[in-house]
């Protein structure tokens, strides 16, 4: 907690709120995007620009930017920026939010802040020139519980029908992403990936069962909670890959969990998997359903 | 209708139960967690692919409160109140008064130690 102007403030509350806001933009119509940009120019004392709106990432990337190069270089961003730079990014808006809640800002500034929020929520990338403003609208963002870009069913950043593909925060070309999430990638292809982050994720999707069959391995230890299977394959740290294996009672099939190669027993593997050491506990389930 | 295949593993620590890959740990006490009022339900884990979630429901939300940290979710149930941990594919766990921790399974990641497992 910090204190501003006599008000107690929890910084984490504002960090969480504004990250969520920045990644969950309000979908805006073309008219709204245009109005927002024109307000921005007017507020900076500039003439009304033409607004070109892109709703697809690929269209934006493939646009003939060379033809607008000169005007981009002559961008009026410096003049626009002078008036908006204090507000432009979400972290600045987060500070403004704190100063609003603590009554540091007056009502006029608060109303202005609301307008800047609308501008930002409708666009993700914008190129401001004298006469034209090129806007790529904000995409739909998909993240996992850890906050990393992640989706196994669609682009993690999606504009219309196109987007960018991620798994656990790691970027993939669409074709490779499809072969991983659809599990059509072979063990050989997965372990041949040069990018270590991509390889680690691809191997996770290939799964312990297939890796065990294709790469060979041995049961290193077993107890009443399962088995540790050591593969004849080294990870990025030059340790043999080790999986915990046990029967899933709800599906009546084996589950595999990649585990720390340093653990000695399946019980220790599960203690770590459930972070039970935080509570000074070891894995001793009473009931599994 | 989804059929629930159930097998129970009985024995071990009576305060340590598991619903699929979610742990349900009954704690004696907990420090440094800010508890908030319980609303309609509390999702403690969500499967992206299936869309199914492990969630807590109750008929007396005013007697429950919840908190969260980097390890998972915490639930406080007043004495005499009850709640249930439900999931489309797993048997329901009935919870009575006490403090509970719900944790997801974390998989070892040689690049960054551990990552949370998704259903």
Image: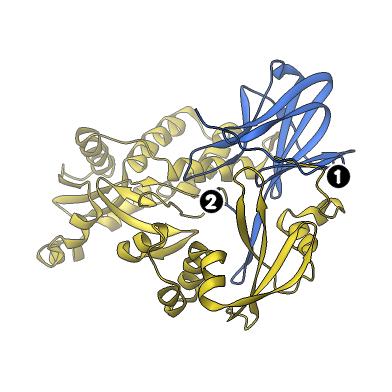
Q: Quadrant of residue A190?
A: bottom left
Give left or right: position of B37 versus A22: right
Q: Position of residue A211 (x, y in %)?
A: 53, 71
Q: Residue at x 80, y 19 (%)?
A: B81
Asked whether the residues under marks 2 and 1 belong to the same chain, the reply is: no
Question: Which residue is painted at 41% across and 33% down in the image?
Answer: A114
A245 above or below A23? below
Q: Spot the residue most to the bottom.
A: A238
**From mark 2 to mark 1, how far is it between C-alphas?**
36 Å
For label 1, the residue is B11
Disc number lying in front (2 or 1):
1
Disc 2 target residue:
A147
Q: Which mark is residue A86?
A: none
Give whichever of A202, A128 is nearer the camera. A202
Chain containing the residue with disc 1? B
Residue B56 appears in the figure: yes
Colour blue maps to chain: B
From the top left corner, tell me how far across and down residue B47 is, in percent: 53, 43
If the image is split into quadrants, where does the C terminus of chain A sit? top right
| Disc 1: CA contacts within 10 A as few (<14), some (14-19) or many (>=20) | few
Residue depicted at x 83% and y 22% = B78
User: Mark 2: which secondary structure?
Assistant: loop
In the orientation shown, which residue stands out farthest toward the left? Answer: A67
Screen quadrant of the N terminus of chain A: top right
Front residue of A196/A44: it is A196
Nearest to the observer: residue B80 or residue A162? B80
Chain coloured yellow here: A
State which chain disc 2 sits on: A
| Image position of A247 with respect to A230: above or below | above
Tag 1, which secondary structure? loop
Q: Nearer the viewer, residue A135 or A260?
A: A260
């Amino acid at each position: 907690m910090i204190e501003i102007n006599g008000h107690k403030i929890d910084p984490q509350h504002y960090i969480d709120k504004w990250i969520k806001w920045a990644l969950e933009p309000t979908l805006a119509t073309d008219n709204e995007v245009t109005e927002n940009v024109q307000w921005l120019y007017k507020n900076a004392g500039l003439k009304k620009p033409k607004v070109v709106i892109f709703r697809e990432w690929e269209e934006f990337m493939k646009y003939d930017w060379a033809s607008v190069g000169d005007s981009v270089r002559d961008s009026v961003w410096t003049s626009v920026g002078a008036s908006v730079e204090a507000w432009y990014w979400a972290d600045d808006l987060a500070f403004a939010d704190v100063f609003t809640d603590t009554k540091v800002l007056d009502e006029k500034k608060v109303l202005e802040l609301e307008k800047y929020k609308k501008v930002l929520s409708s666009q993700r990338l914008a190129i401001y020139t004298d006469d034209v403003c090129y806007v790529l609208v904000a995409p739909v963002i998909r993240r996992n519980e850890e906050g990393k870009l992640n989706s196994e069913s669609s682009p993690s950043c999606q504009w219309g029908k196109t987007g960018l593909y991620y798994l656990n925060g790691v970027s993939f070309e669409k074709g490779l992403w499809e072969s991983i999430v659809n599990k059509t990638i072979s063990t050989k292809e997965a372990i041949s990936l040069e990018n270590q982050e991509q390889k680690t994720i691809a191997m996770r999707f290939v799964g312990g069962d297939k890796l065990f069959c294709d790469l060979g391995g041995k049961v290193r230890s077993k107890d009443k909670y399962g088995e540790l299977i050591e593969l004849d394959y080294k990870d990025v740290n030059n340790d043999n890959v080790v999986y915990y294996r046990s029967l899933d009672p709800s599906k009546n099939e084996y589950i595999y969990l990649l585990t720390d190669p340093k653990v000695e027993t399946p019980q220790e593997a599960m203690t770590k998997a459930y972070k039970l050491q935080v509570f000074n506990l070891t894995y001793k389930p009473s009931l599994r359903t | 209708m989804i059929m629930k295949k159930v097998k129970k593993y009985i024995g071990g620590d009576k305060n340590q139960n598991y619903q699929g890959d979610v742990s349900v740990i009954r704690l004696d006490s907990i420090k440094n967690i800010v508890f908030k009022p319980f609303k309609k339900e509390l999702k403690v884990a969500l499967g992206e692919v299936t869309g199914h979630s492990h969630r807590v429901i109750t008929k007396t939300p005013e007697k429950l409160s919840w908190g969260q940290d980097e390890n998972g979710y915490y639930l406080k149930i007043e004495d005499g109140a009850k709640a249930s941990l439900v999931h489309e594919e797993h048997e329901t766990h009935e919870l009575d008064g006490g403090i509970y921790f719900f944790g997801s399974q974390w998989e070892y990641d040689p690049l960054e130690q551990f990552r949370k497992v998704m259903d």
